[in-house]
Image (cartoon, helix red, strand yellow):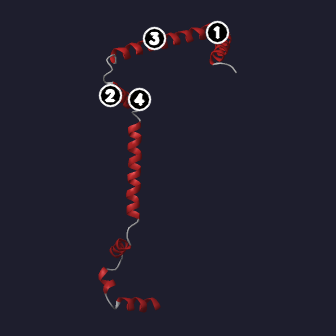
């Protein structure tokens, strides 16, 4: 079984063979990108050592960095919570008790509510519907 070192050597040799086949322009761009990355890494290490040399304030820096990197998280949470609240409110409105539905029926009817309380109204409806 191969060790990690042997596997790494094989990968390096395959990359060297592949890079030998590349154009000079591509190699120059890769070299420039590598130098930029190394420079950024060095600057990052320097800034990290300058900012956190004493070991204080790491928790606040980590939290601030988290908020900066995940600034899309808050709008997504707000939209999701608004959708949940809207769903709950609509469910509360749809499941009205029958008493409230009856009141809406009386107020929306063409007849005044007093007509439904009249004792002779049922007989009048029955007589006129038989005609």
| Residue at the spot 43% in from the left edge and 12% down from the top edge | 42
Mark 1: secondary structure: loop
The residue carrying pointer 3 sits among few (fewer than 14), some (14 to 19) or many (20 or more) residues within 10 Å by Cα, namely: few
Residue at image mark 1 = 23
Residue at x 31%, y 88% (from the top left corner):
118
> What residue does disc 3 label?
39
Cα separation between marks 4 and 3: 22 Å
Which residue in the rendered view is the most extreme toward the left? 114
Q: How many marks?
A: 4
Q: Position of residue 28 (x, y in %)?
A: 57, 8
Please give the residue where the numbered disc 2 appears in the rendered image: 60
Q: Which one is in front in this view, the residue at disc 4 or the one at disc 2?
A: 2
* Quarter of the view holding residue 16: top right
Which residue appears at 31% of the width and 85% of the height?
Answer: 117
Q: Secondary structure at mark 2?
A: helix
Give the Cα separation between the discs numbered 2 and 3: 26 Å
Foreground residue among 125 and 119: 119
Q: How many residues crowd around disc 1 within 10 Å: few (fewer than 14), some, or many (20 or more)?
A: few
Q: Is residue 127 visible?
A: yes
Q: Tags 1 and 2 in contact by the CB under 8 Å rule? A: no
Select label 1 or label 3 by which is in front.
Answer: 3
| Label 1 or label 3, whichever comes before in sequence order | 1
Q: Is residue 62 above or below residue 118?
A: above
**1 or 2: tag closer to the N-terminus:** 1
Q: Which residue is tagged 4?
A: 69
Q: Nearer the viewer, residue 107 or 82?
A: 82
């Amino acid at each position: 079984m191969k060790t990690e070192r042997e596997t790494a050597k094989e990968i390096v040799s395959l990359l060297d063979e592949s890079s030998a086949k590349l154009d000079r322009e591509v190699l120059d761009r890769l070299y420039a990108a590598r130098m930029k990355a190394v420079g950024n890494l060095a600057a990052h290490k320097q800034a990290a050592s300058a900012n956190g040399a004493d070991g204080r304030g790491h928790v606040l820096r980590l939290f601030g960095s988290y908020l900066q990197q995940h600034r899309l998280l808050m709008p997504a949470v707000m939209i999701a919570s608004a959708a949940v609240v809207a769903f709950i409110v609509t469910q509360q409105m749809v499941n009205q008790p029958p008493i409230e539905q009856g009141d809406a029926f009386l107020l929306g009817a063409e007849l005044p509510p007093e007509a439904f309380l009249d004792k002779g109204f049922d007989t009048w409806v029955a007589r006129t519907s038989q005609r």
